[in-house]
Image (cartoon, grey):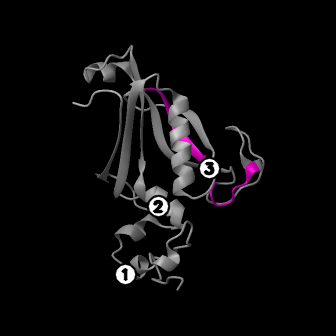
Amino acid sequence: KLRPPFYVVAPGRVFRREKVDATHESTFYQFEGLGIGEGVTIADFKGIIAAFFSTFFQKDVTVRLRPSYFPFVEPGFEVDMSCVFCSTKNALSEPGESKGVGCRVCKYTGWIEVMGAGMVHPNVLKHMNIDSKKYHGFAFGGAIDRLTMIRHGINDIRLFWSGDMRFLRQFTERHSGPRAGIHMDLDSGSSPE
């Protein structure tokens, strides 16, 4: 029932069939966003998302968009941000190029993939009873858990669901900043205290 212009972000819990490992979990939290207005462009989306990441990670972040397919958007793209760990400016290269610098987190590319996005397909706007000739918009979605892992340097997504109080106690004022280095070995149960 919203009428343009509007901007919405909706968080929620997700369940999916997934082989669980350090970077994949069958239960996680996701956010989805939608922005609709007159003259909304990809540049608007890129600027908003770059400002959000720079604020969230408390560091200047560069955003790159790569073509991809997602239902309900056209064009669709993967959103990458410059690595907040190595911040290797000379590592930032176009897809397919490798300058041999970076870190393990960004797989020596200088980029971290963080979400999918795209411009809302005109047919979606029509189904929302919104004039697709007058209004345009962007949509995006990503994992809250993944952004939290990057921000706090958490090395294993399974820790969120482990119920281990040693892990939770690390989120004190002393450890709450970006890349606080929250690591645990799930096999040994050890933590860096």
Secondary structure type for disc 2: helix
Q: Mark 3 = which residue? A: 61
All told, the count of numbered labels is 3
Q: Mark 1 = which residue? A: 165
Q: Where is residue 119 in the image (x, y as percent from the top left)?
A: 45, 28
The kind of residue on which mark 2 rests is Thr
Q: Mark 2 = which residue? A: 148
Which residue sits furthest left? Answer: 1
The kind of residue on which mark 1 rests is Met
Tell me if residue 192 comes above or below residue 85 in the rendering: below
In the foreground, 4 or 26: 4
Question: What residue is drawn where x is 53% and y is 62%?
Answer: 151
Q: Earlier in the sequence, mark 1 or mark 3?
A: 3
Asked if marks 2 and 3 touch (Cβ < 8 Å), the reply is no
Question: What residue is drawn where x is 61% and y is 59%?
Answer: 105
| Marks 1 and 2, how far apart at CA | 18 Å
Mark 2 residue crowding within 10 angstroms, few (<14) / some (14–19) / many (20+): some
Q: Position of residue 175 (x, y in %)?
A: 51, 76
Q: Which mark is residue 13?
A: none
Q: Earlier in the sequence, mark 1 or mark 2?
A: 2
In the foreground, 107 or 50: 50
Tell me if residue 186 comes above or below residue 120 in the rendering: below
Q: Earlier in the sequence, mark 2 or mark 3?
A: 3
Span of residues in magenta: 74-89
